[in-house]
Amino acid sequence: NSVNITNTSRNEFFISPDTTIPAVFELNFYSNGVLHVFIMEAIIACSLRAELNKVSDRDNGAISQEALIRTAAGLCYLLSNEGMLSLPCQMFYQVCHEAVERFIQYGILLVAEDDQEDISPGLTGQTWDKQLPDHLSWRSDEEDEDSDFGEEQRDRYLKVSQSQEHQHFVRFLQRLLGPTLEAYSSAALFIHNFAGPVSEKDFIQRLQKFLLSRTEKKVAIYTESATLCLVKNSVKTFKDLGVFQEHKINRNCILELKTAFLPHSSRQKLLEYILSFVVL
């Protein structure tokens, strides 16, 4: 059973989650349905966190809508193995643009008209695709073409609503992606000491053991970050991003770091990129 039910002398019943690792894993399985309902909103909320960390005091807390969309598109690529984030005919840029527009319609993001000219130099900051080694091919040719969808419109600057209700909702969205982002960032931390080549099966086992150890030692924020599904998805993502190269030996998939990720500095950049979205 994944929940505990207690009752008082007044016949009142209280339901609380069982926090043992097997129970949390089971609850995570059922909660995934909630994540997929809100996943695009959660991606925008975590991208807001990354963009707000870049603004200076003179920006008055206003961020570029274009920069937010591009940062969210980068996060979509990172999480593309976690489910279908867009229809086959849609690009991540367009899906993120639509999600940001919904935030504006809901009043969570406010258009900061007075700040349009004042903070325009902020666009010179690095976008998500410039923060990692050049060989990472996260953006397809189609995605580059689709970016014109945003460039045809005048960039706007946005502020997050200070309404308590809106703040709580953004926090809720950010926490939905918490276990996933913790799993990916922990995997990025784990490969700092990667010694390959190693079989993919063996690497997955070692990585999950590492994540379980973090959970047992109360280092992990989210126990569910150690689920086997997230471990496998993080490894698949790192292969897709070009962190690992793979080859077959006697039907076994062997992993080793690509040349660009042999320097620890490249692996550190990957870790810092993922952590930029994490809300503690």
Image (tube, rainbow, N blue to C red):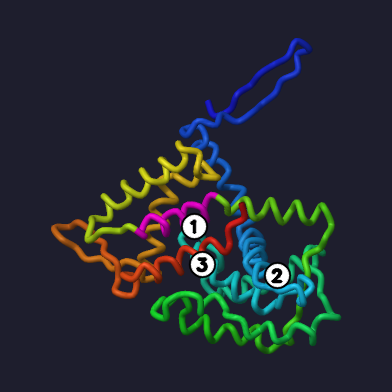
Secondary structure mostly taken by the magenta-highlighted segment of the chain: helix
Q: Quadrant of residue 89?
A: bottom right
Question: Disc 1 residue type?
Answer: Glu
In the picture, the disc for residue 188 is none
Residue with the mark numbered 2: 100
Q: Are marks 1 and 3 in contact (CB under 8 Å)?
A: no
Residue with the mark numbered 1: 82
Q: Name the element at disc 2.
A: helix
Of tags 1 and 3, the one toward the viewer is 3
- Tell me the CA gap for discs 3 and 2: 21 Å
Question: Disc 3 residue type?
Answer: Tyr
Residue with the mark numbered 3: 273
In this orientation, which residue lies closer to the viewer: 236 or 271? 271
Question: Disc 2 residue type?
Answer: Val
Which residue corresponds to the image point at 65% horizontal and 65% vertical from the top-left? 44
Where's residue 243, x and y in %? Answer: 36, 68
Where's residue 197, x and y in %? Answer: 22, 61
- Tell me the CA gap for discs 2 and 1: 20 Å
Residue numbers of the magenta segment: 179-192
Which residue corresponds to the image point at 47% horizontal and 52% vertical from the top-left? 183
Position above or below: 217 against 153: above
Q: Name the element at disc 3.
A: helix
Which residue corresponds to the image point at 81% horizontal and 52% vertical from the top-left? 165
In this orientation, which residue lies closer to the viewer: 59 or 147? 59
Residue sitting at the far left: 250
Q: Residues within 10 Å of mark 3 (few under 14, many from 20)?
A: some
Tell whether position 187 is magenta.
yes
Which residue corresponds to the image point at 46% horizontal and 69% vertical from the top-left? 269
Q: Are marks 3 and 2 in contact (CB under 8 Å)?
A: no
Where's residue 247, x and y in %? Answer: 22, 66
